[in-house]
Image (cartoon, rainbow, N blue to C red):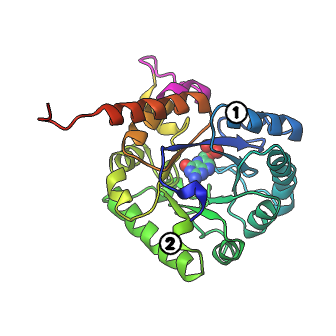
Amino acid sequence: MSSLLVPGPTRVVGVLNVTPDSFSDGGHFLAHEVAVAQGTALHAAGAALVDVGGESTRPGAVRVEVAEELRRVLPVVHGLVDAGVPVSVDTMRAEVARAAVTAGAVVVNDVSGGLADPEMASTVAELGCVYVLSHWRGFSDVMTSRAVYDDVVAEVSAELRGRLDAVTAAGIAPERIVLDPGLGFAKVAEHDWALLAGLDQLAALGFPLLVGASRKRFLGALLTGPDGVVPPPAARDTATAAVTALAAARGIWGVRVHDVAPSVAAVRVARAWGAARTPVGAS
Ligand code: PMM
């Protein structure tokens, strides 16, 4: 088993988007050296992994060419690997996954769960790295219209099960897989909350879980003031850390966040709380 997946406290995965248009940090880290410095800082703040992405997945985003995605991501992966930072690559493309893992990335984080690129599962199987498989129902241009469920937790579980069967049939070792409910991907706020509340049901699939709530729309909606003003993404970090604390208390494998330090603190709180708990009735 990869050392990344041995049981332990909830890992904090730092987000590093090298895109001009990601919803919360787009355009901030376009220069490669700035991106490497930011990734190194996320690691120093306690991120177990830094997740480098070169294609925005926000609703309505247009796809980038593979050459452009490689141009954005690869120098940053190289720079972080050289600096000793464990790297994950956030991509839906097998070609980018292969290049990044060859450059030293240890995780492929595919928000499409292998659906966007038919070569992804066999490529990851061959690379032998950890694979984050997310729940997904379509690219950014159609995902909002596909946010329709009768029982979101049951349907996401079943669809993840289907993807697990497909990617393991393509050769990915089950012990290298992490599942992610894909908050915000073909989901509206009520779905995101139901999935967070249903983490135990998702855990019953038998795989480590990663949750990416950081700065997402459902937190913006939650924090909207009486004046109707939705706080901007960067003003949602405290709420993100609260999600981390609650998710860590459920014992999940990891959280993917933009602002690492508050989530590292939240994981510690959840751990200390759990360790101090005495069974009811114990003297
Ligand atoms: N969310 C975004 C991008 N990548 N990867 C995983 N595994 N889970 C997520 O929820 C997720 C992701 C959304 O965009 P962002 O990079 O701006 O947070």
Q: Position of residue 55 (x, y in %)?
A: 73, 52
First-in-chain label (1 vs 2): 1
Q: Is residue 34 above or below residue 229?
A: below
Q: Position of residue 46 (x, y in %)?
A: 62, 35
The quadrant holding residue 1 is bottom right
Residue corresponding to mark 2: 163
Task: Name the residue rendered at 84%, 58% in the picture.
Answer: 70
Residue located farthest toward the bottom when viewing the structure as drawn: 169
Please tell me whether residue 30 belongs to the stretch shown in magenta.
no
Q: Amino acid at mark 1?
A: Ala
The magenta-colored residue range is 225-239
Q: Amino acid at mark 2?
A: Arg
- Numbered badge on residue 44: 1
Q: Position of residue 152 (x, y in %)?
A: 36, 57
Q: Can the viewer see residue 206?
A: yes
The residue lying toward the viewer, choosing from 52 and 60, is 52
Determine the secondary structure under disc 1: helix
The residue lying toward the viewer, choosing from 262 and 4, is 4
Determine the secondary structure under disc 2: helix
Q: Quadrant of the C terminus?
A: top left
Task: Please indicate whether residue 240 sits to the left or right of residue 52 in the image.
Answer: left
Residue located farthest toward the left when viewing the structure as drawn: 281
Q: Residues within 10 Å of mark 1 (few under 14, many from 20)?
A: few
The quadrant holding residue 97 is bottom right
Task: Name the residue rendered at 59%, 57% in the picture.
Answer: 3
Work out how far the residue at label 1 is from the one at label 2, CA to CA, in angstroms: 34 Å
Residue located farthest toward the front when viewing the structure as drawn: 283
